Image: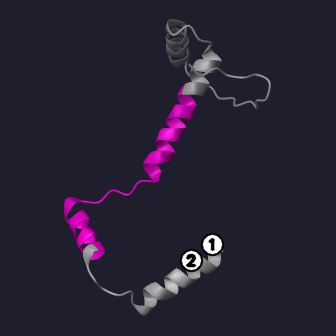
Amino acid sequence: MTTFSQSSSTRLDFRVKPDQKSLIERAASVEGRTVTDFAVTALVRAAHDVLERSSLTSLSAQDAKAFLRMLDSDASPNAALKAAAKRYKKSRG
């Protein structure tokens, strides 16, 4: 169980409807946690989920097959790809 540390924290203030507050309080109580600990844990988990989903690229079955064919091909990089790789390496050090 994640616990919230008061020693090194910043505030995050927001308003909720009375029914939302009641629901959150009941859920926190069922788990034997403070509302703060319950809310912070839920918000952090949700933030991780959003960021993980945003970093994934989804392809249709057709696009996935085309991508894999390109990876398996023996084609040499063209001038545009070589230039892009050079720019990338220069910007990344």
* Cα gap from disc 1 to disc 2, whole angstroms: 6 Å
Q: Residues within 10 Å of mark 2 (few under 14, many from 20)?
A: few
How is colour applied across the structure in the image? one colour
Q: Amino acid at mark 1?
A: Arg
Q: Which mark is residue 88?
A: 2
**Residue at the location (57% across, 82% down)?**
87
Residue 26: x %, y % from top left: 51, 9
Residue 5: x %, y % from top left: 72, 23
Quarter occupied by residue 37: top right
**Residue at the location (28% across, 70% down)?**
67
Please check the rendered image and state whether residue 30 is part of the magenta-colored stretch, yes or no: no
Q: Residue 66 versus residue 9: which sits nearer the camera? A: 66
Q: Main secondary structure of the magenta part?
A: helix
Q: Which mark is residue 29?
A: none
Q: Which residue is mark 1?
A: 92
- Mark 1 touches mark 2? (CB < 8 Å): yes
Please check the rendered image and state whether residue 70 is part of the magenta-colored stretch, yes or no: yes
For the C terminus, give its image quadrant: bottom right
Quarter occupied by residue 79: bottom left
Q: Residue furthest right?
A: 7
Magenta segment, which residues?
42-71
Query: Is 68 situated above or below 90?
Result: above
Left or right of 5 in this view: 74 = left
Q: Residue 69 versus residue 12: which sits nearer the camera? A: 69
Q: Amino acid at mark 2?
A: Tyr
Query: Is 27 situated above or below 7?
Result: above
Residue 45: x %, y % from top left: 52, 32
**Residue at the location (49% across, 14% down)?**
23
